[in-house]
Amino acid sequence: MHRYRRRAGYDGPQLAALASPGTGTGPCLAFGSSGRLGAARHGLSRMQLSANGLAIEVDDQGPPDGVPLLMIMGLGMQLTAWPDELVRLLVARGFRVVRFDNRDAGLSEGFDASGTPSLAWALLRFMLHLPVVAPYGLADMAEDAFGVLDALGITQAHVCGASMGGMIAQHMAASRPERVSRLTLIMTTSGSRRLPQSSARVRATMLDRRGGDDVDSAVARLVRLFSVIGSPGYPPDPAELRARLAASVRRAWRPGGVVRQIVAIAADGDRTPLLSRISSPTHIVHGGDDPLVPVAAAHDLHVRIAGSTLEIVPGMGHDLPAALWPPLARAIGRA
């Protein structure tokens, strides 16, 4: 039995004790407003439900008989990182858009009781091609996503994943192809070790430890990060970016969860063997100027997923800038 709890609002700030600033950030950003959306589905779109045995925060938009579209966000990011206006554009195209906070992120159930793994030790083992032990894996997060669909009574959905969300989507499409009608992979990778890695500047910024353990310092670190990994062809207004980041941090800040998710990615390793099992029609979208996941990753996915289509967006980095929301809605619609 799945239990639903409609939310009248948010629980307020959920600031966990900040871990190292370099790991307390997620690499995929596209914030919309943090308020509730629309009233078409009985007045409230946000709810918390039981999925795969966990309490998962979900936003369900659009007509009940629309084409179900499950949107999965990246490392440490919240459902609000899918911009509200992009959701509205997708709803206008006939989709029933379902966003959710991954486990250990946003307002969904966390795994603090599992402890915070040593990121340095996990990455060292990864570099030495040794097994990495994680509190949970990306396959578990894929089961969470299926659990969200189950709780909403959705048997099959178009699945769209960004960054780490795209990795989770790969697991979904490979493990239960009958449940994934179509697949959209945005700025993501197979995890192949042969692919180019992020730039030295990106790595240095992600390890930047300046600042304290307060909201303003967390926001300042995020601003520095997204000024490096964002889209050079579509630079954001600095004040607007800072305001959106501050709203996100105040909604939830889970640096321990980010570390556990990084370790889950490291433990997942190379997903290349999974890709031959993906049979859903697949559209791959990637920024031509992505410094975090270089564009070679998109070409690799395109070669390895049979029948897939590829769209490289000039000037796009590792974010979802406002100018690209209409073409992104069209790209998702064509998958």
Image (tube, rainbow, N blue to C red):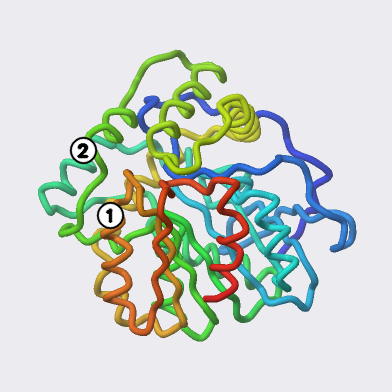
Q: Closer to the camera, 286 or 56? A: 286
Rendered residue at 51%/43% (across/down): 29
Rendered residue at 33%/28% (across/down): 205
What amino acid type should be assigned to the residue bearing mark 1?
Answer: Ala
What residue is disc 1 on?
A: 267
Q: Is residue 284 left or right of residue 214?
A: left
Above or below: residue 91 compared with residue 34: below
Q: Is residue 187 left or right of residue 32?
A: left
Point out residue 14 in the picture as x, y percentages from the top left corner. 62, 31
Q: Earlier in the sequence, mark 2 or mark 1?
A: 2
Secondary element at image label 2 = helix
What residue is disc 2 on?
A: 121
Q: How far is disc 2 from disc 1 in space, using C-alphas?
A: 12 Å
Above or below: residue 58 compared with residue 204: below
Q: Is residue 1 visible?
A: no
| Crowding near the residue tagged with mark 1, few <14, some 14–19, many ≥20 C-alpha atoms within 10 Å | many
Point out residue 241 in the picture as x, y percentages from the top left corner. 58, 31
Point out residue 79 in the picture as x, y percentages from the top left corner. 61, 50
